[in-house]
Image (tube, rainbow, N blue to C red):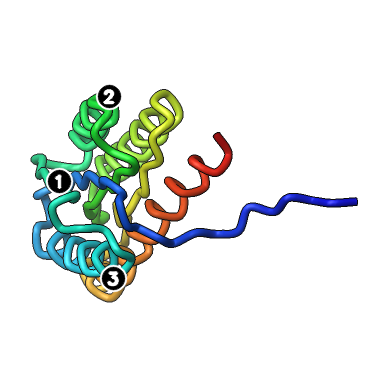
Amino acid sequence: MTIRELEPNMAGRGMRVGIAQARFNEDIGEGLRSGCLAELVRLGVAEADITYATVPGALELPLTLQAMAQSGRFDALVALGAVIRGETYHFEIVSNESARGITDVQLNTGIPIANAVLTTENDDQALVRMVQKGTEAAQAAIEMANLLKAVK
């Protein structure tokens, strides 16, 4: 029996990537952004092929990502942001609804979206994770874009 295995492909050369970042918790967002951009370039994505936009908060990410996906200009997208637990139920609403919206856009458009919206209990947890999560989001975006091309 011969099985065709689609190996992970992390080659970013020629890929066009859009990034949408929430400005709320901006310091964390900047850490996510730096990790993401550095990794995209390391994987071979040309800086000229990266488009970066900011939005007020995590709930605005899905609409922006949807517009980017529908533009036909991108092979992959990345969502960056941080939702840090407070004393109210608002944390759950923002966390759940932004994640649902991002997933819906991805499934409805067929454009892979790496979700790097951190959801943490406090600032310290977010600070520890931000650069690594941005790096991992870049890797996931490129890997998924290549996988979808291979499947098609």
Residue 150 x, y percent position in the rendering: 55, 44
Labels 2 and 3: the sequence-earlier one? 3
**In terms of secondary structure, where does tag 1 sit?**
strand
Residue at left 27%, top 39%? 94
Q: Which residue is mark 3?
A: 42
Residue 76 x, y percent position in the rendering: 33, 43
**Distance CA(mark 3)–CA(mark 1):** 16 Å
**Distance CA(mark 2)–CA(mark 3):** 27 Å
Q: What amino acid does circle 2 point to?
A: Gln
**In terms of secondary structure, where does tag 3 sit?**
helix
Quadrant occupied by the C terminus: top right
Labels 3 and 1: the sequence-earlier one? 3
Mark sitting on residue 95: none
Which mark lies nearer to you, 2 or 3?
A: 3
Q: Which residue is mark 2?
A: 70
Which of the 4 image quadrants contains residue 130? Answer: bottom left
Q: What amino acid does circle 1 point to?
A: Thr
**Do tag 1 and tag 2 residues touch (Cβ < 8 Å)?**
no
Closest to the observer, 81 or 10 = 10
